[in-house]
Image (spheres, grey):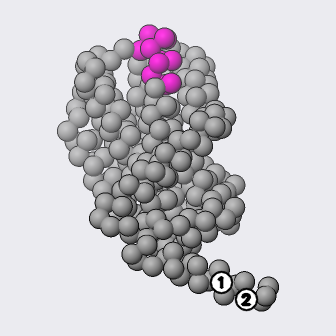
Amino acid sequence: MPSQTPDIVTTERRVTSAPGRRSGGLGAGPRHALTLTWRSLLKVRNNPEQLLDVVIQPVLFVVLFVFVFGGAVAGDWHTYLRFLLPGLMVQQVLFATMSIGVMLSTDITKGIVDRFRSLPIARSAPLVGAVLGDAARYMISMVVLLAFGGLLGFRFETGLLPALAACALVLAFALALCWIPAFVGLLVKNPQSVSGIGFVVLFPLTIVSNVFAEASTMPGWLRAWVRVNPVSQVVDAARGLMLGGPVAVPLLATAVWGACILAIFVPLTVRAYIRHT
């Protein structure tokens, strides 16, 4: 009898993987994705330590850069706080996108994806649910950073609605960018590799930008990169919406970068995920 077990398992998977069973009719895919989004949120609720990076790290970065480097860069920390906070918000949210790659890699290594494969759910639901669930981390990071900045004296100079638009823009760009670590998480052999690769890519991308200093203070060869860096475009748009200044050009550039990232990495990620399911 033990020799027949693989055949039984294979049969069960074929039955549960049939198109009719997986789709569940029109509208089933979004419903399944929202259910698995809730799963991601429950994981955070049951394991609040997963939020340490998006709660502690923003505060540490503000304290480090504003009080240690603020006087040297801008003359006083109050002036530097005004300049830094919108850019730091972008950086922290982009760093938070690494978690989705770690989570997907963990699900693969622990066999969670195999369990999803045996369920009568839309094939893309776990992937979409993971992306939507991760958005909660991005919003928490922004709230913590802006709240701490507010305690130190940071104020929105353009009003509440433009500031909310800046937060929505950063969130939208993060949701586009998170497909890159998601793709990496489906390719690597262990979750630790996702964090390593993400740090190697994101750290220089955010440091060599206008998050911490104006591009005009940099050498010409570096300034050229900073001005086309997608992170710089998002930061310029966020600063314009929060503090005043040009918005149209960086907003358009951000939209173009986001659309290009989605066009390239969504198909690649979906294809990589299908190979595992």
Outermost residue, right side: 2
Which amino acid does the dot numbered 2 rest on?
A: Gln
Q: Secondary structure at mark 2?
A: helix
Q: Is residue 253 above or below residue 89?
A: below
Residue 81 in the image: state x and y as whole percent. 46, 18
Residue bearing the label numbered 1: 8
- Quadrant for the C terminus in the image: bottom right
**Magenta: main secondary structure:** helix
Q: Are marks 1 and 2 in contact (CB under 8 Å)?
A: yes
Q: Is residue 234 magenta?
A: no
Residue bearing the label numbered 2: 4
Q: Is residue 230 above or below residue 147?
A: below
Bounds of the magenta span?
Answer: 144-154
Answer left or right for 8 relative to 98. Answer: right
Outermost residue, front side: 1
The answer to which quarter of the image holds residue 31 is bottom left
Residue at x 60%, y 43% (from the top left corner): 43
Which amino acid does the dot numbered 1 rest on?
A: Ile
